[in-house]
Every structure is written in C-alpha cells, then in structure tokens.
Image (spheres, rainbow, N blue to C red):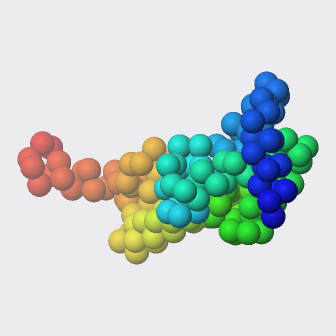
Amino acid sequence: MHIAVTLLVVLSALPLTPVQEAKVDRLEKKLMAPCCYSQTIKDHMSDVAAEMRDEVTEFVVEGKDETEILTYYRKKYGETILAEPDGWSGRILIGIPALVVVLASGLVWWLVRRYAAARGRVLMPTGAVALAGGPGELDAMRMRIRAEVGEE
C-alpha cells in the first residue's frame, strides 16, 4: 500500500507532456462528477471529482487510451458518467424526440384532413378551403348570392 501511494506521489510530480495534458483535459470534459452529475470533473470541486481527476491523470501517465479509461468509468458508474451519450444510447436519445415530432405532425395533419372531409370541405394544397362539390357547385352558389344581394 505504501508503495502505491509513493508511486502515485512520484507520478503526480512528473510533468505531463503536451499530448498527455490535452488527453487529460479531453477526458475531464467527457466525465461527469458522480456525486451530483451536474458538472464535469474538470469543473466540479467535490472530493470525488478531485479523486477522478487524479485517477485520469494516473491512467494517462500509465499509457491507457481514452477508450479504456472511459470504459472503466462506464463500468464503474454506468452510462450517466459520460457527459455526452455514447453509441446507440446517444442516437436513441436524439432520435426519439425527432420521431415523436414527426409522428405528432402526421397525426395532426391526418386529423385536420379527416375533420375537413367530414364537414364537406377539401383542403387545397395552398391552404384554401373549397366545397367538395367542385367548380359547378361553386358557380351556382355565387349566382344564388348575387341574386339574394340584388346584383342581378
């Protein structure tokens, strides 16, 4: 146990290369603080987030790649540890609301068309409403209106 603590102190004292610093920075932005899941470990000031920052730095110094590190934390805490959903879960989270909007729009359009058809009207592509009887019935109605108003 004392050897591990000594090794950790020695490793943390070594300066990171620019590539390692960039990797640590990317990983800290990809992981959420597990105490409340409100901020990434880069920004969160809890003890757990500080421990995770140290672990991430240690993993990077050991030479582990990003996928290994993220997989380790995903197994330990679950998918919610990731700041951005990964793989299919991310696609599903984005796709479900879009699918609901498309289906709801189609349902509303279908209901409006059905209501209009039941009232004897046909929705025109431009949004105008015409009587279902066609142009002949429309001309007859115009003549009747003119006769009632006294224009003829």
Return the residue nearer the eye: 106 or 78. 78
Q: Position of residue 21 (x, y in %)?
A: 75, 31
Return the residue nearer the eye: 102 or 121. 102
Q: Residue furthest bottom?
A: 118
Q: Position of residue 110 (x, y in %)?
A: 51, 67
Answer whether residue 66 is visible to the viewer in this image. Answer: no
Name the quarter where the C terminus is drawn: top left
Q: Is residue 2 left or right of residue 125?
A: right
Name the quarter where the N terminus is drawn: bottom right
Q: Residue at x 82, y 27 (%)?
A: 17
Return the residue nearer the eye: 45 or 104. 45
Q: Is residue 123 left or right of residue 100?
A: left
Q: Position of residue 18 (x, y in %)?
A: 79, 24
The vertical placement of 46 against 28, above or below, is below
Q: Is residue 115 left or right of residue 73?
A: left
Q: Residue furthest front?
A: 2
User: Picture quarter containing residue 25?
Assistant: top right
Q: Position of residue 132 (x, y in %)?
A: 43, 63
Q: Residue at x 53, y 43 (%)?
A: 43
